[in-house]
Amino acid sequence: MSGEKITVPDIMAAKGKRKLTMLTAYDYPTALLADKGGIDMLLVGDSLAMVVLGMEDTLSVGMDEMIHHTRAVKRGTSRGLVIGDMPFMSYQASIEQAVINAGRFLKEGRAQAVKLEGGARVCPQIKAMVESGIPVQGHIGLTPQSAAQFGGFKVQGKNAGAAKTLIEDAKLLEQAGCFSIVLEAIPAPIATMITEAVLIPTIGIGAGSACDGQVLVMHDLIGLFDRFVPKFVKQYAKVSDIILQAVKAYKNDVETGRFPTMEQSFTIDTKELEKIK
Ligand code: KIV
């Protein structure tokens, strides 16, 4: 794999040629690892609120927190495309506010693109961002910022009417200028239809294997967040067990005098020591 920096046109050109990979990253170490692992896109997701900041949902995380974490992710990334996730109420109230906040992700966070949730209703904001030179990734299906409207975290597009709206939304997002679209918790056959209906890549999470790429939350993938594990997650490791084991071993070593030993201690010349006594 080439070590060259991935660009938005690279992502768009990958459709139909190779599968794209995207992972969330929230800080310098997760970005370093995702980037070293060759992941194409690093999303500073608003899932930060839940998996890093311990909040109940994604609604309370703000622009300043998102920018702070985006800067850290950017410092740990040399190849992947860094995408900042626009938090709840940073783009819904007005087009002007949406463009200003999207711009902050690029200016202050040094992200190369932003992502925001919604279909037809956010197209005016997306058009204005793209006209300002800001690359935008769309996100439809289960959009967690609207979970209250959906009555919870539920699979979307399960009847013909809802599925048609999702297909229409995807086409509108493409027309508005999105360079790719995240499809979250959508029946696989509908995600396939959406993928075939647009020329931009679809990135699935709980949307089957026909999408042009896949995304997962890093802390789900590595098993560092287990308040709940969605059906669409595949845990590739159980890092929380390893960390807990290390913490317990450390506590035990300190309490029993096995840590620190001379190996982890510093000495002083005996003559110097004598002078103090
Ligand atoms: O915030 C997030 O982690 C996301 C992904 C699940 C796509 O939006």
Image (tube, rainbow, N blue to C red):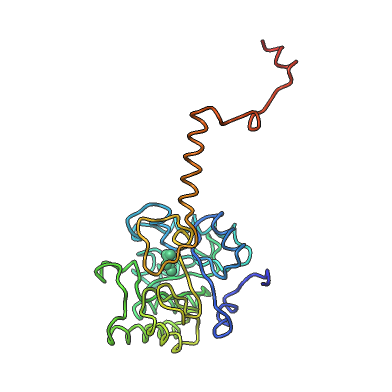
Q: Is residue 86 visible?
A: no
Residue depicted at 73% across the width and 17% down the height: 270
Residue 152 visible: yes
User: Between 247 and 144, which is closer to the camera in this rendering?
Assistant: 247
Check the picture and name the quadrant holding the C terminus.
top right
> Which residue: 41% across, 85% down?
194
Image location (x, y in percent) of residue 231? 37, 68
Q: Quadrant of residue 145?
A: bottom left
45 is higher (above) or lower (below) than 195: above
Of 223 and 215, the residue lying toward us: 223
Spot occupied by residue 138 in the image (x, y as percentages of width and height): 43, 76
Left or right side of 54 for 244: right
Residue at image location 39% in from the left, 79% down from the top? 123
**Given the current orientation, which residue lies at the most extreme bottom position?**
197
Q: Residue furthest top?
A: 277
Q: Is residue 51 above or below residue 19?
A: above
Q: Position of residue 62 (x, y in %)?
A: 39, 57
Would residue 7 be found to the left or right of residue 92 on screen? right
Give the number of callouts: 0
Q: Position of residue 33 (x, y in %)?
A: 58, 59
